[in-house]
Structures are given as C-alpha cells and as structure tokens.
Image (cartoon, rainbow, N blue to C red):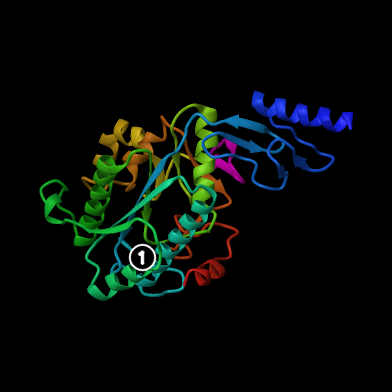
Amino acid sequence: MKKSITNKLFIKLSKILGYEIIDQNNFNSPTLQKELNEDLSIINEKSIVLPLGEVKITKKINSILIIFRTNTNIEIWDQNKKRIFEKPKIEYSLRALNSLIKSIIFSKTKYPDLIFKIIIVDDKSNTENLDKIKKIIEKNNLDISITSLNHDKYKDIIKQQKNDQTFSNLASLLQSFELAKELSEDLVFFIEDDYLHFEPMMEEMIASYERIASQVNKDIFMCPSDYPYLYMNNEKTNILIGNKRHWRTINQTLCTFLTTKPLLNKYWDNFYNTCLDRNDPFEKHLNEIYTKEHCISPLKSLSLHLTNINSSYGLSPFIDYKKLWDENG
C-alpha cells in the first residue's frame, strides 16, 4: 500500500516538474499514460523518441497553407517521355489530390487544432477535368479553393520563353509564391500535381518539422520525396531523427517542398528570380538558399514523384509503386 501511494506521488510530482517516466518493465509511461509503442509526442509541446528522450518544442505550428499546382493537360513538362503507368495527365492530378487529402485527414485526427488551407492554382484545365477535381473536393470537409492561373499578369514580368509550356510553368510557380507571401502565416507547403503521398506524410512532416527545427533552433526547408539523384553523387550528408523516421540533409529540391513564412520573406528574391526565366537547373535560385539554410528529405520517402521510370528526379527507391497508385484511384 505504501509503495503504491509513493509511486502515485512520484508520478504526480514528475508531471508537475515536466518530466516523463519510462517503465521499461511494463513497457509504458505512467506520466503519459501510454504504452511505449504508442505516439509519445505532444504537438507544440514535446517530441519524444525512444531511446533519445525528449525535445522541447520551441518552433510551434498553428497553421499550414498548402498550394497545389495543377496542369491537367501537359503529360510531362519539358519532356517527350511518358510517366510510369502511361495514363492521361488528369489521372495523376486526381490521384495526387486524393492522396494529399487523405494525408491531411489522417493528420487532423492526430492534430485537430491545426488549421489547414489548400489553394489549387489551376493552369487552363478544361471543364471536364475541373469538374473531376471539384468532385474530389466536395467529398471532403476541408478548406479547399481553386484559383485560375492569370497568364496576362506575368507576360511583362517573365522573360519570353521558347514555348507556352515553360511560360505557364514559371507563371504558375510565381503566382503560387505570391499567394504564399500574401496569405501564409506559418508553414507553407508547395506541391505539384504529379506526387502521390503516403497517408502519414503530413503528420510526419509536421511532427518532424517541430522536432528538428526546435533542435537546430531555426526554421528549415523540407522535401517529402527521397529522389534517386540523391544517391548518384558521392556527397556527404547528415542523418537526423524525425518523428517516426530518419531524415537526411540535402542541397537540392524540385518545386515540391515545405518551408515557413519567415524564410519565404527572407529569401523572396530567390523565390522571385526562380520564376523570371528558365534557369539551368530550373531550381537554381532555390538551391542557393540551401547553402545557407537546413533542407532535409525523408528516409524512406513520404511522397512519390510520378515521372518516367528512368528519371533521376522521379521514383523513390524501395516503394511499392503500384500499390500506392491503386490505393489512390
């Protein structure tokens, strides 16, 4: 009886002092009232990963603005190759949006107080394709809006390009960056419409952002995809512990990445200059940022870039591509 009372008092005192108790004999945490194989972290408060212990969260998240760029007509921009599965582009856009929505809903069950807002920047989808997109939106109780790409706004800003596809891609990206600069308050996530996302993607991005940004004590960039090109050069990298997986530091991304409003403002010239002309590589000015700021990608991948099977910027290794494709049809 005395031992039981003492244990209860010790647990209560530990909670008051902000400490967590791990009972490895019973494989639980009396202070958290959870089994050790459960999620022990608390959003915006602490990140707990066994056996590394606790990280106090200083980089807290309140909202996420997601800007989803769609072009349902162009099979692969700037290429004549076909994508894996060789379907019409609208199929990739629909499955990408569907997987994103599923990931957000999964995340909201874990983090119900976070605010999610999705803006779809659409580039000249025909009525039939837009109706298909709207049907997916209507099935879900999420804050999702569609805005059309304003080509005329950027004709005197973006340099003349060899073809309309390149101009449209640059204009779409610039409009997305401008919307983020105007409307984002916290995290902003730029996503292209040829990525399939695993259901835990959004949860892992959020929780790992909080943990790693708090550890390094600064805002960071995150890419959800583990690209094959990352393994084609003998480059050094640092491995970090996220929420439920490892992450690696990288110095290049494509145009699907997550960052923060302060970093968007700090490097606005880089974001803006990315869209003024077709650079080589396309993301040249974005990559310049990663020489000064932390950018990380997951091991293994949280999202799959659905390009040609031979593309070094495409399919992540060790993924069941067909299964993920079928799950989001």
> At x 53% / y 53%, what residue is drawn?
109
Could you tell me the amino acid type at mark 1?
A: Ile
Residue that label 1 marks: 137
- Magenta stretch encompasses residue 162: no
* Image quarter of residue 6: top right
**Most foreground residue, 290 or 234:** 290
* Image quarter of residue 97: bottom left
> At x 70% / y 35%, what residue is drawn?
31
Q: Residue 139: where, in percent of width, then height?
A: 39, 68
- Taking the image as shown, residue 33 lies to the left or right of residue 137, namely right
- Quarter of the image where the N terminus is located: top right
> At x 55% / y 29%, what residue is drawn?
215
**Most foreground residue, 237 or 244:** 244
On screen, 133 above or below 202? below
Task: Tell me, yes or no, if residue 232 can be seen here.
Answer: no
On screen, 159 above or below 129? above
Q: Main secondary structure of the magenta part?
A: loop
- Taking the image as shown, residue 200 lies to the left or right of residue 219, namely right
The magenta span reads: 232-248
Task: Tell me, yes or no, if residue 109 can be seen here.
Answer: yes
Q: What SS does tag 1 mark? A: helix
Count residues near mark 1 (Cα–Cα under 10 Å), then give few for <14, some for 14-19, many for 20+: some
Q: Residue 83: where, in percent of width, then height?
A: 42, 68
> At x 43% / y 65%, what residue is drawn?
98
Q: Residue 321: where, in percent of width, then height?
A: 54, 66
Q: Residue 24: where, in percent of width, then height?
A: 81, 39
- Magenta stretch encompasses residue 244: yes
- Taking the image as shown, residue 279 lies to the left or right of residue 226, namely left
